[in-house]
Amino acid sequence: MKRAAAMTFVVFASVACGGQAPVASSAPSPPAAPTTPARTATPAPSPAATEPPEFEAEVSTVSRDRLRHSWRPGCPVHHRDLRLITMSYWGFDDKPHTGELVVRKTVTDDVVTVFRKLYDWRWPIRRMELVDVYKGDDFDSIEADNTSAFNCRRATGSGSWSNHAYGEAIDINPRENPYVTAGGDTAHKNAEKYTERPMKGKGVINPGDKVVRAFADVGWEWGGSWSGTKDYQHFSKGGG
C-alpha cells in the first residue's frame, strides 16, 4: 500500500511540473462577427466660387418721358440725339449692379469702353441713376453720391452751357470726388473730407490713376487737372 501511494504521488507531480493536463471537450465557438471598417468622414465639397457676370451694356434711344426734368426745348442737344446706356457697374458693396446713363449718341462707344474697364477692375461706383430721379436737381444728385451724365444746365458759376447739357460729360462718385473751389471749399458737407488730393479711399479718383488714364485713352479730360477750381468727379469729351 505504501508503494502504490508513492507511485500515485509521482504521477501527479509529473503533471504539475509541465505535463499536459487533459483538455475538457466543449462545443465549438461561434465564428467571430465580421469587423466593419471604421468610416472616415468626408468633408462636403466647398461650393465653387461664383464668378460675377460679365460686363453688359445696351445702348438704346431714350424717350422724352425719361428726361422729364433734365431736358427742355432750347437745350443745345435735342433729346432725339441722346442715348440711354444700361450697363453693369461694380458697387461699393462689392457686388455687380446695373445702372443707367444718358449721353450724346456720338460718345456711347467711349463711355462703354471706359466703364467696361472700371467693371473689370472692380472699381466701385456708389450708384448710377438718371438725374431725373432727383427731378433734374444736380445738388440732390451729388448729395446722393450719384454718378450721372446728361443734364441740361449751365456750368457751375457760369452762364454758359455745361458739357453735361451736351451729353458729353460724366460725374463719377461726386461725394468722394467733389467740386472744390480755389480756396479749398465744397458746397457739400458730406464731401468735405475728400477735398484733398492725392488721397486713399474707396471710389476716389487721383491724378494720373487708371481711371483718369482710361478716360484719356478715349479723348476725355478730367476736371481734377484744372488750375484753381478742381472738379474731381468730372470727365468730359475734349474738356470743359
Image (tube, rainbow, N blue to C red):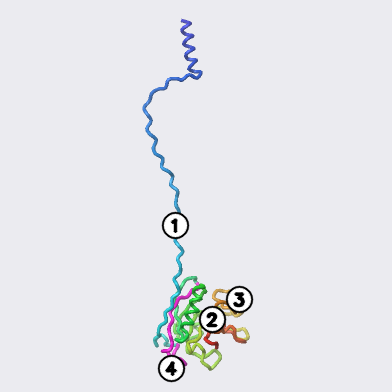
| Amino acid type at mark 2 | Asp
Q: Which residue is mark 3?
A: 199
| Amino acid type at mark 4 | Pro
Report, in whole angstroms, how far the alpha carbon at label 4 lies from the one at label 1.
62 Å
Q: Nearer the viewer, mark 3 or mark 2?
A: 2
Q: Which residues make up the magenta segment?
A: 70-92
Q: Which residue is mark 2?
A: 217
Report, in whole angstroms, how far the alpha carbon at label 1 lies from the one at label 2.
45 Å
Q: Residues within 10 Å of mark 1 (few under 14, many from 20)?
A: few
- Contact between labelled residues 3 and 1, with CB atoms less than 8 Å apart: no
Q: Nearer the viewer, mark 1 or mark 2?
A: 2
The disc at residue 73 is 4
Give residue 174's position: percent from left, percent from top.
Answer: 53, 81
| Amino acid type at mark 3 | Met
Residue 190, visible in the rendered structure: no
Residue 73, visible in the rendered structure: yes
Q: Secondary structure at mark 3?
A: loop
Report, in whole angstroms, how far the alpha carbon at label 1 lies from the one at label 3.
42 Å
- In terms of sequence position, does the residue under pointer 1 or pointer 3 come before the other? 1
